Image (spheres, coloured by chain):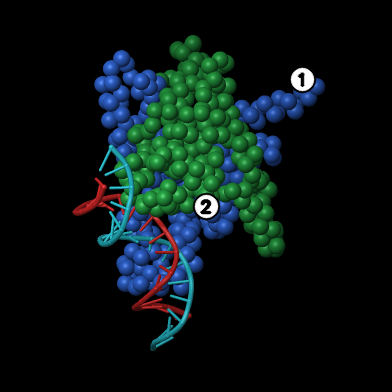
Chain colours: A green, B blue, C cyan, D red
Amino acid sequence: MDVIRAGTRLLDTEGVEKLSMRKLANTLGTGSSTLYWHVRDKDELLLLILDETLREVTVPAAGTWDVRLLETLVRCHEALLPRPALVDVLWRAAWELGPETLRVADALTGLVAESGLPDDEVGDSYMALITLLFGFVAGERTSPGNPRYSEARAEGETAGSGPPYPNLMRYAPGAGVETMARQFRYAVERFITGIKLRVAEHERAADAPRSS
Amino acid sequence: MDVIRAGTRLLDTEGVEKLSMRKLANTLGTGSSTLYWHVRDKDELLLLILDETLREVTVPAAGTWDVRLLETLVRCHEALLPRPALVDVLWRAAWELGPETLRVADALTGLVAESGLPDDEVGDSYMALITLLFGFVAGERTSPGNPRYSEARAEGETAGSGPPYPNLMRYAPGAGVETMARQFRYAVERFITGIKLRVAEHERAADAPRSS
DNA sequence: ACCTGAACACCGTTCAAGT
DNA sequence: ACCTGAACACCGTTCAAGT
């Protein structure tokens, strides 16, 4: 009666919309009420699955903060991508998270702090980075490869007198999982660059405090 | 029988979890089946509400691309924040969006393109920015001010031998809507800085093509 | 300590039937 | 063209009762 293992398998094979307490109970050969002895409610079940999912995420020990930060975030992205529904748990649970989740969160915060950013900006940058992570994962919740873009493009072009949304037509990216991974990496890289420049700004202000 | 107006009011007064087709029909004094003559399904209803919500977002005409981009994103954030559930529509609908939504999306893409980024990076940067937008809005879906953090902090400190998650304890930001707005602005500012540095990199490579 | 059946209070959507 | 009632196929959760 390993509820979280069965739940994980159901999540992986069928997707979230199929993961109901009743269906889960069914695969275990019982009624749904039985589950509530093993787990407080559905939220707790998903939270436990989330924590198990993040167990595999290790934090590189060597290297500069920027590459370790990028690498850790990419590993989180890879871990969450097969189960994108779990980001909703992260958003919902706010602070009541499992130990593995908190471990990764703490490590990410520490890496951001290593950048040399002033203390009061570490939280903001951490927040921005996990928001990118959650957002890029969330975008995968309902798009299993979705090729709807080409339809939209075709529609736009047939509507005469030029495409009504020229910038979207011209620059809109494709879909696909390898694209998403690249886009996430690109986003984090640009943001980390932004952090570095911010740190340099602060250092310049500290070196020559009376020049401005 | 203005379904989208009634739906919007229900969404604003009661929240998404209360916005069901049955309850909405109830406030209109009919059965839920009646709604399906006016609207294809619940998704279309939310999509129409989303488009109406984004109508108020205007794009500043004057100024450099960076401040116009930041300002437009902040306006989107302000518009969506009272109805955070609508970001799920954006993620779900992929490309079948309303005209107002596409207008704003096209404007944002155009502003990113103005940065001077190479064409193949415009889409990636646009994606990153709307992911930040969606993510920061999504974070508000279930946290109406949530002050859970102080509890977690207290719990951590009483657990003896120092806090188990030192970085989280030290740098974790507070909650509150004014904080979220500031955090979003901070995130976009850092990312735009990252874009600028990227553009400079490309320009340097173009000016001295045989130096590397 | 663990499991059961039945019930409560909901959902979105469809569809034949009415006016 | 617009609305109705009844039904279908679901949800999460509770709770007295069993072993």
Q: Which residue is mark 2?
A: B92
The image shows residue B160, relative to residue C10, as above or below, that is above
- Lateral position of residue C16 relative to residue B149, left or right: right
Q: Which residue is more in the foreground, A32 or B59?
A: A32
Query: x%, y% of residue B9?
Result: 35, 60
Q: Residue at x 32, y 72 (%)?
A: B29
The chain holding disc 1 is B
Query: x%, y% of residue B7?
Result: 38, 62
Q: Secondary structure at mark 1?
A: loop
Q: Amino acid at mark 1?
A: Ser
Q: Amino acid at mark 2?
A: Arg
Q: Nearer the viewer, mark 1 or mark 2?
A: 2
Q: Quadrant of the N terminus of chain A?
A: top left
Q: Which residue is mark 1?
A: B212
Find the distance from the CA under tag 1 to the CA under tag 2.
45 Å
Q: Secondary structure at mark 2?
A: helix
Q: Can you see residue B64?
A: no
